Image (cartoon, rainbow, N blue to C red):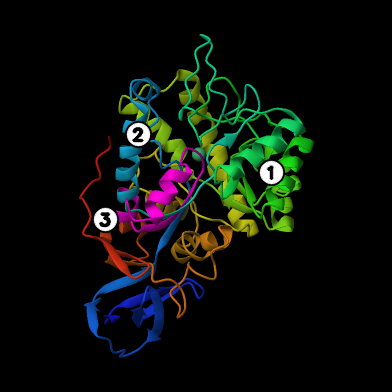
Amino acid sequence: MRTVFSGGQVFDARGRTVAEADVAIEDGRIVDVGHHLDGDRSVDATGRTLLPGLFDCHVHIAARHIDVWRLLQTPLSYRFFETARSLQETLRAGITTIRDAGGADLGMKRALEDGLISGPRLQISVVMLSQTGGHGDPWLPSGAEAPLIPTYPGMPSGVVDGPAEIRRKVRELIRDGADVIKVASSGGVLSSGDDPRHPQFRPDELEVMVTEAAAAGRWVMAHAQSTIGIKNAVRAGVRSIEHGIYLDDEAIDLMLHRGTFLVPTLVAVQGVIDAAAAGAQIPEPSLRKAREVKEAHSDSFRRALAAGVRIAMGTDSPITPHGRNLRELALMAEQGMAAPEALAAATQTAAELLGLQDELGSIEAGKRADLVLVSGDPLQLATLGEHVEAVWKDGVEVSRGRLASPSAA
Ligand SMILES: [Zn+2]
């Protein structure tokens, strides 16, 4: 069965252009892009545009929100059902591939692959590595521990110190199915006891992570906000800097030299402020840090963009609710990224970051038929999220029409 999307436009992620073209798909693959194509079945794309299936390179799909008090009162297994809903909402937004930055496990990935639940294809990191007292340490001043994701079989603690423990933990995560290793090489905003300006883990510890991951054919992604934490991670050879709040010129040069990607997650900082305004229980130090880092973050993004650092789209959802991922594209455009470049950050560049560029990230013959049909002007990124009409993954229509506004629960 050959299906042709006819009469519409296509976003060319390589050329960064939008032009009229038909697209033919068969057996889950794109087989032709051209004019006046024939097929057994046709989808009328008149007045609409086809985008490649979009990527979100930084989500926490197994978390529904960041309200610690609510999380503490939620049964563990309830959260797995919530995850199924979050996956659906993400798919409906046009996101057909996600990289999970902590919290998703092998069971979720396998359930997706086997069709028990539907959602974007998924790369998992299982849990983020954190030093004692670092960004991922769930310890609270009361002595209680409140992890965003509790430990269970296949979801170990990520708190480790020293090269020997780290080596063992990376191996354990790979045993647990990690596609990528995630580390916090600096403090963060949501962890109330540390500082985004401080580096975490020493260079020798980061090097062990990268070496051990590479031995198993994996890359490392680094939550890195502090300038030193960013440089340590880049020098150790991580694949991507997540957030990158305090980038100086040397950090940017290092990233260019090493080919390190930046996943800015601009929407995350605003999301913390918005969630608190909507009544979520966010600790006061976290809220204060969110307000403090906002300007530095935008400034770093603009300088990295101007310097030509490879930028891939990520949101840190659910800091903003799942399904509203495309808000990030609007924020990137607001900070000076040209709209076609922002779309490329969520398609071609993202596919490169995840090592999937031969299969996904552009609409070309031979690639997987992940497609998003949008109405209106696809370069008006502020409203793109409202214009997603239908989504195909591996040639199968997985979403038609989206909820006016995904529930914020
Ligand atoms: Zn994150």
The residue positioned 56% from the left and 46% from the top of the image is 178
Q: Which residue is mark 3?
A: 386
Q: Which residue is mark 2?
A: 79
Amino acid type at image mark 2: Arg
Q: Residues within 10 Å of mark 1 (few under 14, many from 20)?
A: some
**Tag 2 and tag 1, C-beta contact below 8 Å:** no
Labels in figure, total: 3
* Real-space Cα separation, disc 3 to disc 1, in angstroms: 36 Å
Name the mark nearer the viewer: 2 or 3.
Answer: 2
Badge 3 element? helix
Q: Is residue 356 above or below residue 147?
A: below
* Real-space Cα separation, disc 2 to disc 3, in angstroms: 27 Å
Q: Is residue 314 above or below residue 390?
A: above
Q: Which of these two is toward me, 278 or 237?
A: 237
Q: Picture coordinates of residue 80 (x, y %)?
A: 35, 37
Amino acid type at image mark 3: Glu
Q: Which residue is mark 1?
A: 248
Q: Which of these two is toward me, 25 or 59?
A: 25
Q: Is residue 390 above or below residue 246?
A: below
Q: Does the numbered disc 3 mark a residue whose Cβ is under 8 Å from ligand 1?
A: no
Q: Does the numbered disc 2 mark a residue whose Cβ is under 8 Å from ligand 1?
A: no
Name the mark nearer the viewer: 3 or 1.
Answer: 3
- Displayed quadrant of residue 160: top right
Q: What segment is highlighted magenta in the picture?
A: 89-116
Q: In the rendered image, is residue 262 in sight?
A: yes
Identify the mark nearer the N-term, 2 or 3.
2
Amino acid type at image mark 1: Asp
Q: Picture coordinates of residue 2 (x, y %)?
A: 30, 82
- Quarter the N terminus occupies: bottom left
Q: Picture coordinates of residue 174 (x, y %)?
A: 61, 45
Does the magenta portion include 111?
yes
